[in-house]
Amino acid sequence: MTNRGVDEEKRATLRRFAALGAATPFAGLGAAESDEEGTPESGSDARDAIVGYVASTPGAHFSKVRDDLRLGTGETQYHLRRLVDDGVVEFSRDGDYKRFFPAERFTPFEQTALGYLRRDTPRGMLVALLRNPDATGSALAAELDVSRATVSNYARKLDEAGLLSRENGYTVVRPETLITLLVRYADSFDPAAVSLADDAASFISYNP
């Protein structure tokens, strides 16, 4: 693919997410700034795109924001730092990662949940357990095509994070919150999450 083709794809990606970011109350912050040569800064589209991306993909870590928006490392660092300083975006620590969220939108529990939902195996385990609360560790390992030890390791981490109880098998903690997050942001996860979102009504019982 030619550089021109890559640039066109990057611009299309930025425009798509900038349209989401432009709908926020903080869109265009700093757009009138100038770059080192004194010309109007062209980064306002990138900044609005980051706002839109974080709004639609909460819990994404730095590298995912940068790569999905096709931005440079320095460019991404600069805009995220400005957005954090301006109170538009906030982040939480997740080991070596910084995970980014729209400011003041998610509780600490929801931020932790979204952080784990951004990881393939923990998300797969939670989705499988929401569908089948009686699933065993061996069944989860077989369904996700991972080792039993991998399931045990992530089950321990999910337990420590307050998302899973291991007292009697595996039990999802606050399943309603997990389902809400999976349904709301299904398109930013994977086909299994989309399928769960499509079937979400079956998880809700009505008892007038």
Image: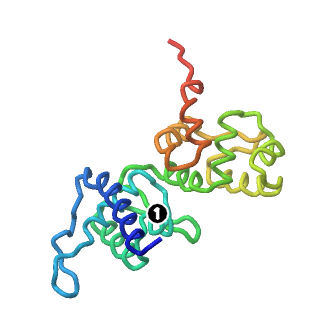
- Write down the quadrant of residue 18 in the picture: bottom left
Horizontal and vertical percent position of residue 20 = 31, 51
Classify 21 as above or below 45.
Answer: above
The picture places residue 62, in percent across and down from the top left corner, at: 47, 68
Residue found at x 23% / y 58%: 27
Residue drawn where x is 78% and y is 54% of the image: 146
Q: Nearer the viewer, residue 106 or 179?
A: 179
For label 1, the residue is 68
Q: How is the image coloured?
A: rainbow
Residue type at mark 1: give it: Asp
Left or right: 10 as drawn, with respect to 61: left
Find residue 22 and report its image quarter.
bottom left
Relative to 68, is 122 on the left or the right?
Answer: right
- For the residue pair 42 and 193, the one nearer the viewer reads as 42
Q: Residue furthest front?
A: 2
Rendering coords of residue 95 (x, y %)? 59, 68
Residue appearing at x 24%, y 73% in the figure: 42
Using the image, determine if residue 12 lies above or below residue 70.
Answer: above
